[in-house]
Each structure stands twice: as structure tokens, then as C-alpha cells.
Amino acid sequence: MRIVLPLFDRFTALDAVGPYDVLKLLPGAEVVFVAAGAGPVRNSAGSLALVADATLAEIDSCDVLVVPGGPGVDEHVEGGPLLDWIRRMHEGTRWTTSVCTGSLLLGAAGLLRGRTATTHWRRADVLTSFGATYTPQRVVGDGRLMTAAGVSAGLDMALTLAATLADRTTAEAIQLAIEYDPQPPFDAGSPAKASQEVRDRLAAGLR
Amino acid sequence: MRIVLPLFDRFTALDAVGPYDVLKLLPGAEVVFVAAGAGPVRNSAGSLALVADATLAEIDSCDVLVVPGGPGVDEHVEGGPLLDWIRRMHEGTRWTTSVCTGSLLLGAAGLLRGRTATTHWRRADVLTSFGATYTPQRVVGDGRLMTAAGVSAGLDMALTLAATLADRTTAEAIQLAIEYDPQPPFDAGSPAKASQEVRDRLAAGLR
């Protein structure tokens, strides 16, 4: 079972690594990070680089596609090789998935027209501009498309996927392996739960 | 504020990237991945490599040390340059922290003697062999040491740290930025919650 995660400059690392560290534990999983060119790909902060071990041109099919998001998404939504590749890959996938603003790439590739989907809560308007119906849920499945909300939601999506790709016992064993028994010290992880002060702090750029 | 994460062969990616994507959002944060040699460092599956941008020798102090775990930990607990470096760094940190079996490195470096600490639930016996009292909580603070349980617990630890390094409003704004409103599809994230069948599946190696 081949699972492929495309990287691009200014991606968000946790969008990719959360699902990666779940899905890599599936029996028979072969996971590949790909990018336009092989080698290190930097995130938006510039202080993290993940290595792409193959080029987009080298990978022409997979069972599961996991598209991460990040500020760099905006450089690709107008069209180009990454969208073309996503469209081609989607033809043969069992699951085409995204985390955070990765769904904007699926949308820009034309895969979400008339579909329900989610994205980072701050970019819902962009998602709908691609013809999708934004659903403010953490994980949204529609056919063989599955989208997750912002950044950390990729963990919940990956466990959901794991149960469909293997079975529920395996998925729960992976949850136990990564000790995913979340206990956040605060309860501000969604716009509905965060205070106005917290939303203002984020809107001001966390400075 | 300098935050440093050491990498080593066969580390677990999410142990490092979870805290990274929280702490990098702190105002004034400068985050650096380091390793014995600069360049790509592979995880235990071999399909992921994170780039170390500096060598251990180049970094001699930091405000926050975050030590990830992973199968590769076992190659360092007997002693060597990584433990020596951790000991030296700890002298000047505001916080010395670990995720998952990263606490075994802190323990092997002698930093947890007589301390309460946590680790991945499967390795609690090793932690106690270093003179620590294993506390089966998700995040354990003792003085300026903070340890997190397995893999995904680094997210909860990093948010706790963020509140002490900045303030609670900032920490909550980071939680909102990464949309950390966890909704795992199952409730098997700790040995107490997982069924015997699930524990057996994991013990059999997820094959």
C-alpha cells in the first residue's frame, strides 16, 4: 500500500508528519514524501526542512494521497505542475486526502466541486470559492475524498483512514502506539471555543 | 528565545514536530534542529528525514531544550557525545524537556535522578532504572524539567510550555492556530483505555 505526501516550499510540517506517523504503522505501508525536486523542502518559518525522496515526475500512482497545507499553498492554487500532478494521482487513489489548507489544493485542482469538505477555519471562504461546501467539522469524508481541519486535525483523520485501510483494532493499536490520549491544557482549539481576546491575539499575528 | 531540538538516527518524527509547530509560533522564538552532523537525519522507518541545520558542537546553549524519542534512543543511553551535550545544555536552559522516550536520554544523562518524570508507557521500567519516579501522566513537570508521555503528548507539553514562556493568551492563540481541538475517532490512546485485543495487536508488532 503506497501512501504519498507531496511537499512544497512553506508547507506546515505537522500537517504532514501527524498523518505520516500514524499511516506509516499500517501493515504493508510504503510511505513516500515527494516534491517538485528531490531533497530538502523548507516550511514557512524556514527552520524546518523535510526531505523529499522522490520527484513528482517519479511517482505516478498511489493508494493514499495526503496533501498537507501551509502558507505555500497560495503559490500553487492558480495552476501549475503540482495541481496537474494531484489531478493525475487522484484518478488512481483509493483515498485522496488533505490536512488544513491542503484542501485548497484539492479544490484548486477541481476535485471538490459539489463536495463537502473542510480546511483551516481561517480559509473557509477560499475553499467555498472552489465550489465546495465548507463543513466545519474536524474530519469530512465525501466519497473517496477526506479532508481534515487545521494542522493537528490530520491525526484524527489518519486514525479514521487507518480503520478503513486496515481495521478498527489496528487503528486503535496505532492510537495506543502514539499514545494519542489528548489532554490539551486549554480549550481554545476552535474559533467557537476560543475567547475574543485569544482570537484577537492570533489575528494580530502572535507578536 | 532559542529553542533547540536534537535529532539522531531512528528518532520519532512527531515527537519533534509536534512541539516544534507549537513553539515556533512563540513571539521571538528561534528554533534550531541539531544533530551530530548537519544534514538529513532519518527516522526508524527510514521513509522520513528531517534536516539538522547545525551540529551539536555548534550549539552550546539554549533557553528550551526539547529531546524527542524513538527507537534510536537505545543507541545513546550507554553514554557518548549526545548525553554529554545534553548535560552541558541543561546547565543553561530555562526548560529541559523531552517527549516519549526522549526522557530516557535525560535519565541516562543523570538529569532525572530523584525526579518525577514520564515516558512512553512501554518503557517506564527503563525510566525508573535511571533513578526517576515514573508518573503515568501526560505531562510531568519537576523543577525546570518537563517530560511528556508517548509521541503525541508533545503537543500537550508544548502548549503548557508556551504558557510559561509567554502567557496563557498566547498559548491559547497557538492552540487555535493549529486548531488543536482533538477528536480522536477511538478512545484507545492509553493502556488503561485500550482493550486487551488492541494491546495484543500492538504487542504483536502491528503485522
Image: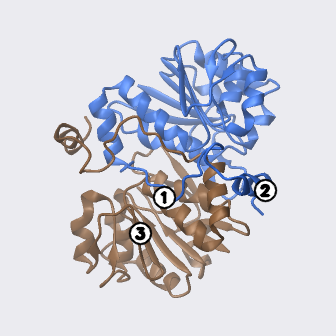
Chain colours: A brown, B blue
For label 3, the residue is A147
Q: CA distance from mark 1 to mark 3?
A: 11 Å
**Closer to us: mark 1 or mark 3?**
1
For label 2, the residue is B205
Where disc 2 sits, the SS reads loop
Where disc 1 sits, the SS reads helix
Task: Determine if residue B52 is in view.
Answer: no
Categorize mark 1 by other alpha carbons within 10 Å: few (<14), some (14-19), many (20+): many
The quadrant the N terminus of chain A occupies is bottom right
Residue A68, above or below B156: below
Categorize mark 3 by other alpha carbons within 10 Å: few (<14), some (14-19), many (20+): many
Categorize mark 2 by other alpha carbons within 10 Å: few (<14), some (14-19), many (20+): few
* Front position in the image: B109 or A147: A147
Q: Amino acid at mark 2?
A: Gly
Residue A63, above or below B96: below
Residue A134, above or below A199: below
Q: Amino acid at mark 3?
A: Thr
Q: CA distance from mark 2 to mark 1?
A: 22 Å
For label 1, the residue is A156
User: For the point 83% across and 25% down, which residue is it?
Assistant: B78
Toward which corner of the image does residue A22 lie, by quadrant? bottom right
* Front position in the image: A171 or B170: A171
Q: Amino acid at mark 1?
A: Asp
Q: Position of residue A17 (x, y in %)?
A: 54, 54
